Image (cartoon, rainbow, N blue to C red):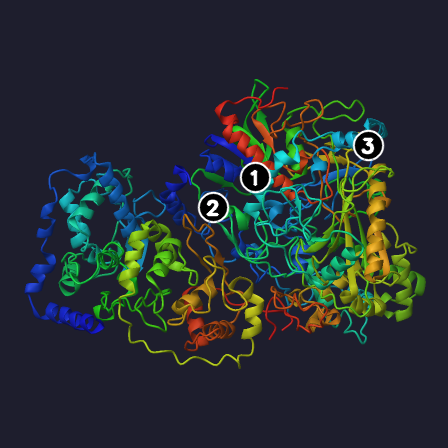
Amino acid sequence: MNRREALFSLGSMAAAGSLGSAAAAAELKGFPAQTAMSADHLPVPAKTGGGFRVLTGETEQKTVKAVFDRLIPADANGPSASEAGCLEFLDDQLAGEYGAGKALYLEGPLKPENEEAIMGAPQFLTSPRERYEAGLKALEAYAQENDGAAFHALSPDRIDEILAGLEAGEIDLGEGVNGQAFFELMLQNVREGYLADPLYGGNRGMAGWKMIGFPGARYDYRPYVDRRGEDLALAPVSLIPLD
Amino acid sequence: MANERPKADVVIVGLGWAGSVMAEELTRAGLNVVAIERGAWRDTSTDFPPAVDPDELRWHTRRHMLQPMSVETTTFRNRTGQEAAPVRNWNAFQFGWNVGGAGTHWAGMSWRFLPWDFQVATQTAERYGQDRLDGLTDEGLMLQDWGVTYEEMAPFYDRFERIAGTSGKAGNLNGEKIKGGNVFEGPRDRDYPTPELKDTNWMRMYRETAEGMGYNPFTIPAGNISQAYVNPLGVTMGPCTYCGFCDFHGCGNFSKSSPQACILPALMRRPNFTVLTETEVLHAVKHEDGKTVTGVNYVTRDGQEGFQPADVVVFTAYQMDNVRLMLLSQIGEQYDPATMKGTIGRNYSYQTCSSVTAFFPGAKMNPFIGGGALGVQIDDFNGDNFDHSDLDFIGGAGIMGYSTNGRPIANMNGIRPGTKRWGSEWKEAYARDYQEAANIFCQGTSMPTRDAYLSLDPTYRDRHGQPLLRLTFDWNRNDKSMIAHATEKAIAIMKEAGGEDLMVDNQAEASWNPYKQHSSHTIGGLVMGADPSTSALNLYLQSWDCHNVFSVGASAFPNNGGYNPTLTVGALAVRAARAIHETYVNNPGPLVEA
Amino acid sequence: MAKWIKIAGGAVVLAAIGAGGWAWTSLNTSRSGVADDSVALADFTSDDAEAVARGEYVMRMGDCAACHTRGQGDFAGGYEIPTPFGTLVSSNITPDRDTGIGGMTERDFFDALRQGIGQHGFLYPAMPYTAYAKLTDGDMHDLWAYMSTVAPVSNDIDENGGMAFPYNIRLAMAGWDMLFFSNSGFEPEAGESEAWNRGKYIVDGGGHCSACHSPRNALGAEVAAAYLEGGSLGDWSAPDLTQNPHVGLGGSTAEDIAAYLRKGSDGVAVAAGPMAEAVEHSLQYLTEEDALAVGTYLVSLPASDTPAPEGADVASLPHAALDYEVNCSACHGLSGEGITGMVPAFAGNKGLLGDPTNLIHAMLKGARAPHTHEVQTAAGMPSFAWKLSDERIAELLDYVRNSWGNAAAAVPASSVAEMRASLDAREPMANPAQ
């Protein structure tokens, strides 16, 4: 230790006293003394009780449910997407920063064709909220035009057929909506809802975690690491206690 | 300038690993240091304790701790002549956005590069002949030595390992090869600070298989440390708990090497150290003499601009930002692939990778038991550890069987090939394959070419109106051959281990793009070297063009080894810091005559 | 020994109430006669560098900065101290003539520190002059020399503006002094070792340990009968420092205690809360010899009468074992072993088995270990108020206080609820899946 280190203690005391909870401030001297969780790193549970905030239309709710429950149907391996809360999950996600595309670079110029060519796939040029709005409308329009019925009224087999067509890029949902990209977005989100912590509104009863045997929000596997190859049968745990 | 701060001896731009190591060295030597960090203050118990850390959606899927693209992104194209497109969504690049930088949420693989990696040009010519080197050059490869050797770097590697508490087992102690360690590593003076981590089920299978095939498996040296440890700064770390929430997550129990766990507790309390958080440096300000800078201009979160004067400016930001800051500061000359003149932006390389996934019927891999750097590797086909005489490439790849995580969203496509990704078919498959899947990853070298480079984008701008950085890059023929070779070896190991239904993803088979990469390792653009016509920085990471500007990062690597870059970044930071406080500040000027 | 203290303590109170002669004793300032009364601090300079260095050591031991340095300059005061009688603000003790103590002579300084008689009248006993009274003349001279080297800071402070009537009348403290204050100096025990006497001098004098570690009566005076048997600081508690084998230092060696004082940990316990501040700002500066002397003295204290706790049954707790594995074991260890010097162990950590206040506080608001020159980490304990209910926190505390050989009384959930309210800790989040 050099002399400057040895002499600093008085200065650091002053700093500790003045900093308090000033973690977000611009200039830091000394080690921030706060012990409370930073507000922006606390979990943000899905808001419940107030109904849907983004998927407010009856038709779009039914369309999402029809799609999600074909992407993840109820069967011997667990409940359906809607039973597991994936619609509530999606609505909450779309209502927040994710839905607003807060992290995305959405500056222009927007050059969809060039960008798709360069990146090898269609690019996000609008927020997920806007993509759902447009995509669900387009799906409903597609069903009305091709089947003469509401999308959610179609048979499971027909919905599967449409989803497979979207996945393969064989169905055109019209101007402004890339059907394949919208399929990928819905598939991503529904499985997120099924497999994310229940605090986000989906994975009810930790059904998704039970399906695969994931023990959830645990943090210490030292007692188990040497038990190689065993069925550990660990009960899953949510980040926020459920019982 | 509206707000001019008191002058500092040194201003450090970006307080990640490189910045923290640099600041620790310089403040201990008595210099007055101000670090400027774009992100917020983050600490273990207040920002990512065990009670909030195991949350995949937030930290991994939504990447809550990383810098969003809306703050700054890059543009990309495969070749000149194309119009680059902005990278709008989360992608391979993992810009840190907090005090601690990407060092807070990295995986922890803690490699020394091979002696060969530092001398690719010389050693290729020596072992395979000048003609071989000339042939590669004619083909477009831009091979050059680093100007420092492994032997010169070894003490700095050692220092960084001691600070980081790296776990592992030596394979080459002063030339003595030790079975169970990496017998191909360069000689080290002493063993790792902490012993190697334990094997998971898959690691044990991989190790036994590789050993049976005559290879030399070893536990990957890790920044997930195996037992409590006190580093030379007096900072204590805890033991890794194999929690499986490592890369993209902070570490809740002080067991992952990071600026938070290893340096900041000591550094932050020094009275000659200050951090400006949530403050972004726009560029350095050149002195009218053109040979130095006077400090940096910055803008705070609230939009207030300011000037931080300093005798020395050190760029220790993310690799991309180091290059961008030099260009925005108009220090040095932009590299031009047409003329091959200019040094800023040249020698860009990546990490050439492939993966082999397979399934083991009835197995319980328990993939949730994991660690960011938890794995077993063979280096028998890395670097120049094998004879390339009859091969059409140089370089190689580390081939690892790893157990980094069992995060359910991240692995939801880890199902047998040909299975639908939705419906009952997916559920049935994932319910089974979550436990039966195992992965081998080939992490290969990457050689720069004449055509791969970084420059400022003519069209797209960031939130402050400054041009984004533009990347022009695609895989080269040499690296494609290299990774095809390594992938064959990985497939053979996987089959020997008993894996079925192999899924091979050789990323170099398609054109590079930032959404498809397994690796985030973006390298070069501001490289060190002995020749000012082919390097931006001299052997002490000092700008050839402005002698009071230094820059440390993977941006300084003239080529990429078949390893993760962090340990080499840390070692270079120690080396540069010592050059600054032992030599430069006493007699400011070029440390190497151009 | 314990009995002697009790008898002596009782006698003090009786004598104070019964005898008018006590007033003369407690307010008599003739001890200060050894100090100069002609030169003010602002005009005084010392050319004795060794005295200044020794004085700095006395300042560290007395931890003057803890209260007098709070963000407005070194020793410039401004620290608000909430008391049951109102809020006190620590004074500016820099040599500034107008707002500090620059106008004081050495004798005034002695009167203030050892007699509680300051330049504006009687001091409040939040200033531990009751302990500093034990400081030797030599240490006082050195401290004076040191204070003369402190940079003057102009910072005007209204020290008792926040005190309620009648406590804002300083003269009232004269009555308090008559009841509770003895201004006698330190008297070594002839039959004890030099180290023991040095330890007692530090504990009772500059270190003012009993200010926290002894209980206080309704008027804020230490209860001599329960000397160092533990005290309450409101939302923190200071544990029993006697040799009590259940909740005290029984089994600790002088070396363990010395390590704790200098590094904030003896390898099992880790300081937190106000004790972390004491270690960080004061105790880590003790020489090894002085720290061992404190240990030597403390291990000689006879055990308090606090009985062995009954213990609580943890096998039937519905959540605790899994909650511990999920939330605690990564740092505190699978067997409650902690991380040496950094994270407290639970196994064998007796300081956690008595009053649960500190544990509840740490669970609700988090805590930090001290930063010392030797042990740099100062690891943080995260707060769990947002995550765990009163019942689950109580359960977890029962679990750690009754596992790995520990035994302690059950913590009522109502205690957690009360502290949650008094600390203004947040309520737990609801899981939408509930």
Both labels 3 and 2 in a single chain: yes
| Nearest to the observer: residue C162 or residue A33 | A33
What residue would you read off at disc 2?
B266
Q: Can residue B19 be spotted in the picture?
A: yes
Which of label 3 and label 2 is nearer to you? 3
In the figure, is residue B425 to the left or right of A221? right
Looking at the image, the residue that sits furthest to the left is: C21
Chain containing mark 3: B
In this rendering, the answer to whether A228 lies above or below B117 is below
What residue would you read off at disc 1?
B19
In the figure, is residue B545 to the left or right of C185? right
Pick whichever of labels 1 and 3 is earlier in the sequence.
1
| Nearest to the observer: residue B177 or residue B539 | B177
Looking at the image, the residue that sits furthest to the top is: B289
Chain containing mark 2: B
What residue would you read off at disc 3?
B128
- Of the 4 image quadrants, the one containing the N terminus of chain C is bottom left
